[in-house]
Image: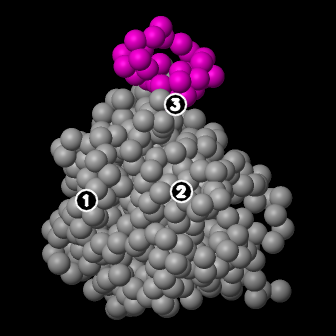
Amino acid sequence: MDIKSPEFKQSARIALQDANLQKALGNLKAGFPGKRAAAVARVPEFEELRDQAHDLKNHILEHLDLYLEEFEARVVENGGQVHWCSTSEDARQTILQICREQNAKTVTKGKSMVTEEINLNEFLEENDIRPVETDLGEYILQLRGDHPSHIIAPAIHLNLEDVSEAFHEHHKRPKSDDPAELMAEAREMLRKQFVAADVGITGANFLVAETGSTLIVTNEGNGDLTQTLPKTHIVVSSIEKVVPTLEDMSLFLRLLARSATGQEYSVYNTLSSGNRRPDDQDGPENFHVVLVDNGRSDMVGTQFQDMLRCIRCSACMNHCPVYGSVGGHSYGWVYPGPMGSVLTPQMIGIEKAGLLPNASTFCGKCEEVCPVRIPLPKLMRHWREKEYEKHLSPKAVRWGLSGWAFLATRPRLYRLFSSSASKVMRMLGGGKGKVTKLPLAAGWTDHRDMPTPTGKTFMQQWDERQKQEKQP
């Protein structure tokens, strides 16, 4: 996937004018947030579960090496293999080698953002191996030559007519506007792919150190067919997804679906624990886990470690006003929304992704709904600080911040300046009750009006109110 994060501003402008995209994003706003709220309301102890998950994730990250080593030992005991990959290239080459050992020509894939991260599909195609996405949303995107714009709903940026057109073009069937017919059509097309695949590749929502098991959470059942029918099953996962025990995994499952789609649980929660045993009815003959670092270990022990608590529920983007306005593709790489604005700079560099942590209103809704309490606004501020320190911010921004810092550290001067500014803004508003043009703030006033200030600063108004309350 090409990196287009430096083009965020241009992409966002185009997205805002895209009527088809705005229609699709309207469906997002009307769906996930309300369903999450209803699901959470049915669990009185939900906030307590969030605290437990927060603390457990922090414990895991403090002992990440030990749990990963335990996970590997259990996988080997179960007859599988674990491959440690520092970079995307390491992961791609490892997966290619496994596929070549099986003389694979066709690979079925479950939904996996990590395989998007390592650009696996294009790499396999370049090496004469055909990947077939089996998640319905991912399958639609593959037909269109498109990429996911959302973590759990990869085709959320499309409407029904877009899907109908793609199926008509590739399946050579009459167009349909019936979702059930389209799903049946996709099921028919994919069934033979499941049977013919030489290798199945899935992601993992969690890795269980206690048992050496991997867990996938789906609503379609395609993941089960992907990992049980082929002779070889490859799990591709990032390193922070390990949990100590099955009981710990169940804690996160109570949070995941409710935060993501508003379900109590996803339809399928499937554990894989190694190769097929002699008395098993199905399952792969070969089981491989490819663990991808890609800069994550560098985050441990830093101010960005909190980001590694993420369980990929997408609640932050479902509630983000910026994502809800411009969609996922505007972010220009694999991970969109608030979590992407923190994770992407770590992976591709703040030099390329500097616009993303700045694309936030800092309303705090992302942190409010995060099931593991990641302080996403604070982490985005840290990236802004790094951007400023490296002189990557525009000069106007750096001068503005320097000026603000100068005033904010000199209280008397700050009060004088703010008092004068409030009076000037009141004069600019006149009797209209609003300021429609403001020097140095055209980015705001070109699109919205600012209420006319009272002419007094907050501190002045506070002092007056305190005096009034003291009067008999």
Q: Does the magenta stretch include residue 35?
A: no
- Choose between 161 and 433: the one closer to the eye: 161
Residue highlighted by disc 1: 97
x%, y% of residue 22?
46, 33
Q: At label 2, which amino acid type do we have?
A: Ser
- Which label number is shown at residue 191? 3
Q: What element carries label 3?
A: helix
Residue that lies at the very extreme toward the front in this rendered image: 278
- Choose between 67 and 434: the one closer to the eye: 67
x%, y% of residue 75?
50, 74
Q: How far apart are marks 3 and 2 (CA)?
A: 29 Å
Q: At label 1, which amino acid type do we have?
A: Gln
x%, y% of residue 104?
31, 46
Residue highlighted by disc 2: 314
Q: What stretch is highlighted in magenta?
A: 162-191
Q: Comparing marks 3 and 2, which lies closer to the viewer?
A: 3
x%, y% of residue 383?
32, 74
Q: Is residue 418 left or right of residue 278?
A: left
